[in-house]
Amino acid sequence: MKAPAFWSVDGSAARWLSPLSTLWTAAGRMRRSAAKPYRSAVPVICIGNAVAGGSGKTPVALAIAAEIKERGLRVGFLSRGYGGYERGPLRVDPATHDAAAVGDEPLLLARSGITVIARDRDVGARYLEAQGVEAIVMDDGLQNTSIVPSGSLLVVDGGAGFGNGRVMPAGPLREPLADALARVDLVAMIGADRTGVIEAIGGARPVVRAHLEPMPGTERFAGKKVLAFAGIGRPAKFAETLAEAGAEVVDLVGFPDHHRWDAVEVMELVERASTLGAMAVTTEKDAVRLPAEARAMVEVFPVALVWRDPSPITAWVRSILGR
């Protein structure tokens, strides 16, 4: 999905659609009030966001899982498997599954721990329990009503924020910001606050700051010309990360979130890069959606989430796990 331009501006289009936003909000609240969620036998940490599209949830989920592992617990990831045709419950195997089957995020998560996709999250949680996990990290689960989380974290992209502050379809919010904040313990803001995130939150919840840092080996991109392409929530964020690492971004080609390329599209990008004297570079999340025969033509730029001050996250995880 590509976000409409008016989602970032509180203009006439947003105001005309606001009655539909009221209906959307009412439906969501009714669904939540009628739900009878499952309470897992193990702690469930929910990683979510308030807006449609990407905000950096998967890197945060990986960082939280690392905190859990440091306490000697076996962690499992639970995902809906957005973008894949498998309904689950299914344990993801990167060696046999692809993004068309299970979605892109689960493939990344599965590199770091047991990962299960399930359209019915409660069924997926039970499946993970049977696998012997001692804690569950639920990726993109804030609006899910089938599981009682032990703790919840709201992820926000500081460069995109909450758009025009309106609920879909008038704006990018999945629900009113106040509703989302009422169900989380902390807010993780990734990148600089360029959109008034802190002001919008207004002290309702503590904000923990983080940024995406290039992983070892990416030094080779410094001083190199690159054509960046990505099908994520905000492709410009990827270009910014490349530039911060010293790469010269000569072109940026953005695609809708979760876009799956065919071999012809990739070849066109590679040829476009060649005419610019550059290399074609994409994100890890995008790379798993490339056709197998085209992956060798594209460079991948991996990043990891780094907390400015990890102590609030460490204390929060400890309070949930009891250790």
Image: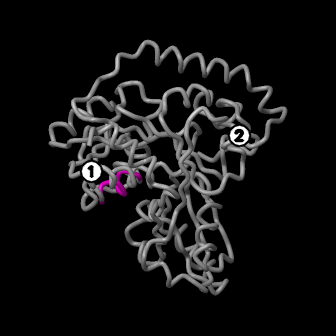
Q: What is the chief secondary structure element of the magenta stretch? A: helix
Q: Which residue is mark 2?
A: 199
Q: CA distance from mark 1 to mark 2?
A: 39 Å
Q: Report the residue at 38% width, 50% height from top.
A: 64
Estimate the x, y position of residue 189 in percent, counting from the top left.
Answer: 57, 49
Residue 76, label in figure: none
Q: Which residue is mark 1?
A: 92
Residues marked 1 and 2 touching at CB (< 8 Å): no
Q: Position of residue 98 (x, y in %)?
A: 34, 56
Label 1 vs label 2, nearer the camera = 2
**x and y percentages locating residue 196 in the rendered image:** 72, 45
Relative to 79, 309 lies left or right: right
Q: Is residue 154 magenta?
A: no
Q: Which residues are magenta?
A: 105-111
Q: Is residue 205 left or right of residue 35?
A: right
Horizontal relation, residue 66 to residue 160: left or right: left
- State which quarter of the image contains the C terminus: top left
Residue occupying image coordinates x 33% and y 55%: 66
Q: Nearer the viewer, residue 260 or 68?
A: 68
Quadrant hosting residue 152? top left
Q: Is residue 108 magenta?
A: yes
Q: How many marks?
A: 2
Q: Earlier in the sequence, mark 1 or mark 2?
A: 1
Give the camera-side residue of 161 and 276. Answer: 161
Q: Give the residue at x 33% y 37%.
A: 320
